[in-house]
Image (spheres, grey):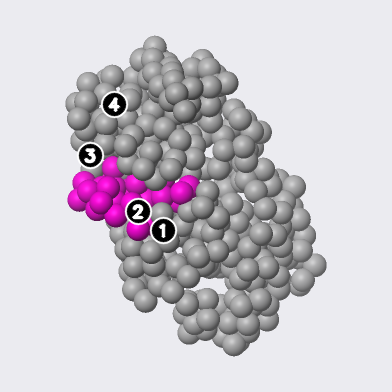
Amino acid sequence: MQTLRVALGDRGYPIHVGPGLLESADLFAPHLGATAAVITDALVAPLHLERLARTLERAGARVVSIVVPDGEQHKDWRTLDRVLDELLASRCDRSVTVVALGGGVVGDLAGFAAAIYQRGVAFIQVPTTLLAQVDSSVGGKTAINHARGKNMVGAFHQPRVVVADVGTLATLPGRELRAGLAEVIKHGLILDASFVAWLEDDMPKLLAGDAAALTRAVLRSCELKAQVVVSDEREQGLRAILNFGHTFAHAIEAGMGYGAWVHGEAVGAGMVMATELSLRAGLIGPQDARRPSALISAAGLPVAGPAGLSPERYLELMSVDKKAAGGRIRFVLLEAIGRAVIRGDIPPGLVCDAIQGCTARGTASSAAT
């Protein structure tokens, strides 16, 4: 096991990374109240819920289990209300600790429930997908979706601890593993060129589920994200660079219907679009612009958005994104591999050209195969 700390003063917390951590009661005990309310989904529950419940009981907590439907489309008001109702029905008071067991959807939903239940209770992140382990479980961003945009209703609420058991990744379907690699790639592209070079060399090991490679990827991603979170916890400036590719990705998810594209797939295509926009804006050269697309493709992720979504529809959806400010859409773009910049002055026509260019290439590639 390896441990790093998110240094947020009295709201700081450890991140534990390694295999077999779901059985480690000593990792949970210091952060639990009398009751642990485990929120998980119907896909994860049969795989890991019983094991974690036994661990939490050994740590001294009464365990309440709340199982919600699987899928991004269920990260909504209806499911949130059901979670709150079950917390109340189980007589959970303000000493309860909410435990999020699952992927990013469960982490976002459970974290938001913890943020608002009885004006805020403690919660623990136990991410079981690669995407959640490297990204959504770290940083305290919690939310549910609205019909007009992804993650539009939420709160900043930091966990007490993140327990990332890389052994749970062995149960991931290939599609979900690839989706998680999108966020790993993102961290390298915006913050660490040497990490990108390692990913280019070791992508086959990651795709094969090599435990050592996955542990390194999770740990380095968490280190990079933690550095940014500590500098800008509430996304007033620097932290927005973590949204590289996400402005486009959220438009894809909202435009196609939540769940049609998993988040990492949309982020993969979104990063290619953001890179294309960086090239067209004159921020990077053609050689640097080719590397993200090649790496994303090597990870088995889409390098183009859906053909049925027009550039104009992208702009409409992106205009209500949380990252829009003062009527302008802010884009995270690349100045170099490992260095990102936030720009709010990109002409809409240039954005449409970048989207169209990526879509056309993706369509041509599909036709060729």
> Is label 2 in contact with label 1 (beta carbons under 8 Å)?
yes
Mark 4 — residue? 278
Please, what secondary structure does the residue beneath circle 2 have? helix
In the rendered image of this protein, does residue 68 appear above or below residue 143? below
Mark 2 — residue? 204
1 vs 4, front mark: 1
- Under mark 2, the amino acid is Pro
Q: Earlier in the sequence, mark 3 or mark 4?
A: 4
Q: Earlier in the sequence, mark 1 or mark 3?
A: 1
> For the residue carrying disc 2, how many other residues have a C-alpha within 10 Å: few (<14), some (14-19), or many (20+)?
some
Q: CA distance from mark 1 to mark 3?
A: 25 Å
> For the residue carrying disc 4, how many other residues have a C-alpha within 10 Å: few (<14), some (14-19), or many (20+)?
many
> Is label 1 in contact with label 3 (beta carbons under 8 Å)?
no
Please, what secondary structure does the residue beneath circle 3 have? loop
In the rendered image of this protein, does residue 363 appear above or below residue 213? above
Q: CA distance from mark 2 to mark 1?
A: 6 Å
Please, what secondary structure does the residue beneath circle 1 have? loop
Q: CA distance from mark 3 to mark 2?
A: 21 Å
Tag shown at residue 208: 1
State the image coordinates of residue 338 (x, y, percent, origin top left). 23, 43
Mark 3 — residue? 337
Q: Is residue 238 left or right of residue 89?
A: left
Q: Quadrant of residue 340?
A: top left
> Is label 4 in contact with label 2 (beta carbons under 8 Å)?
no
Q: Quick one: quadrant of the N terminus? A: bottom left
- Under mark 3, the amino acid is Ile
- Under mark 1, the amino acid is Ala
Q: Is residue 338 left or right of residue 5?
A: left
Q: Which residues are magenta?
A: 178-206
